[in-house]
Amino acid sequence: MTDSFIIAIDGPAAAGKGTLSRRIAEQYGFHHLDTGLTYRATAKALIDARLPLDDETVAEKMAREVELAGLDRDILSKHEIGEAASKIAVMPAVRRALVEAQRRFSEKAPGAVLDGRDIGTVVCPDAPVKLYVTASPEVRAKRRYDEIIGKGGSADFEAIFEDVKRRDDRDMNRADSPMKPAVDAHLLDTSEMSIEAAFQAAKSFIDAALSRNA
Ligand code: C5P
């Protein structure tokens, strides 16, 4: 039993779920965990130790050592770490270890917002609010591209677009916990919706669920 009100937010990379999750957590004074960072931290620990990315026993050991309090978005946001994360995320033992830690986090009172790929389906299937935030691959690739250019970097749109599609394919087609909307998730397609509009839509679902819970 837990007194925590859980908001589960899933969807593919660059659909806007990170920004939306942070905004929701701030609005309601809830804790927030970007679960992608837990897969990224596991992958980075393996890379730093020059260990292989295809040994499930070794990867599970690293996953069990991940400290949720020490996850640093800036350090973990590198493209290569995201690619490596999606490779180790297919391993059931790695997922079991990280899901245990994520479930413990979700029990924090007064509430928690968790975002990822399998929160509404596997990590917190009883969450009273589930959102599935998506956008077309073209729009997501364009957002990534604009973000890199905006920071003064250089980028190749076609290469980013191919990366987005490859990562979606790996996340949607893995056997264990594939990325998909929970049957009771509210779908938010941000292809042509501003983050503000998505936030307002999310807020109305959350407020309705909070008043049912009260
Ligand atoms: O969201 P982010 O891009 O940081 O996630 C990196 C990778 O971690 C994803 O491509 C996915 O393979 C994996 N992941 C996952 N389940 C989650 C969160 C992330 O499999 N709940």
Image (cartoon, grey):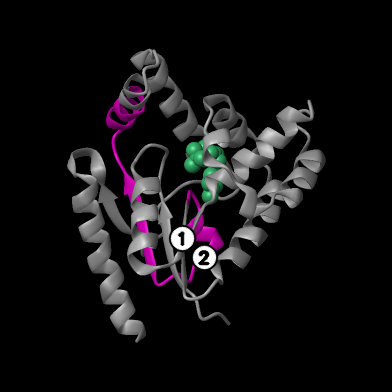
x and y percent of residue 34 in the render?
50, 50
- Is 124 in the magenta? yes
Q: Nearer the viewer, residue 170 or 132?
A: 132
| Cβ atoms under marks 2 and 1 closer than 8 Å | yes
Quarter of image, res 86: top right
Mark 1 lies on residue? 120
Image height of 200 relative to 95, above or below: below
Residue type, mark 2 in image: Cys
Image height of 176 relative to 125, above or below: above
Q: Can you say which quadrant of the picture contains the C terminus?
A: bottom left
Mark 1, Cα crowd under 10 Å, few <14 / some 14-19 / many 20+, is many
Q: Which residues are magenta?
A: 116-145
Q: Nearer the viewer, residue 181 or 47?
A: 47
Q: Nearer the viewer, residue 184 or 9?
A: 9
Q: Secondary structure at mark 1?
A: helix
Marks 2 and 1 sit apart, C-alpha to C-alpha, by: 5 Å
